Image: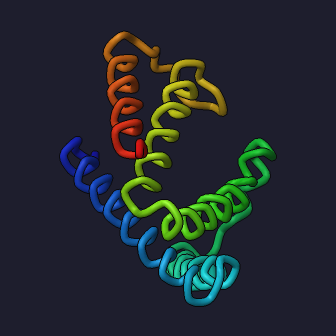
Amino acid sequence: MTTFLALVLIAIVGGAAVVLQAQFMGVLDQHIGTIESVFITYGSGGLLVGLTMLILRGGNLAAWRGVPPYMLLTGVLGLIIVSTIGYVTPRLGLVTAITILVTTQFVLGSLIDHFGWFGAEVRPFDFTKLLGVGILMLGVWLIIRK
């Protein structure tokens, strides 16, 4: 069983990876273009995960038939995420881009949790979460105001 601390550390590593990827893709976007930077990101990531899957699991993808069809949009959503990060980071700046992206994730994540959409476990939106989202929105305003 994974401990809470281990999960927090994994999330921190993932968060750091998002910021580094945003910066790296922003520079790539400026030098070679959005589509090309997305290709490098997805191409290298796809190759790595494909090889890892084959080595560790033998490439068993048969279970995909058991998931709702809309779940297969995850690759398309990933392209939107990666393209957006690469495009907006050099135009808005790293802090502004990440702030808007993360705050949007909190707001939508809160709705998905509250209503249990897309197979999520219901986790009600209470006053403390509302207060937290409000503070995030204040943070966005403080960061993006001119």
Which of the 4 image quadrants contains residue 118? top right
Figure check: 64 above or below 50:
above
Answer with left or right where residue 31 lies relative to residue 3: right
The spot of residue 22 in percent (x, y) is 45, 68
Figure check: 15 above or below 105:
below
Which of the 4 image quadrants contains residue 139? top left
Residue sitting at x 53%, y 66%: 91
Q: Nearer the viewer, residue 7 or 18?
A: 18
Classify the position of the N terminus by image quarter: top left
The spot of residue 124 in percent (x, y) is 46, 14
Q: Nearer the viewer, residue 103 or 139?
A: 139
Please identify the residue farthest to the bottom as the structure is shown. Answer: 32
What number of labels is visible? 0
Please identify the residue farthest to the front as the structure is shown. Answer: 146
The spot of residue 20 in percent (x, y) is 37, 71
The spot of residue 16 in percent (x, y) is 31, 63
Answer with left or right where residue 104 lies relative to residue 65: left
Residue sitting at x 35%, y 57%: 15
Residue sitting at x 42%, y 72%: 23
Residue 119 in view of the camera: yes
Residue 54 in view of the camera: no
Figure check: 42 above or below 122:
below
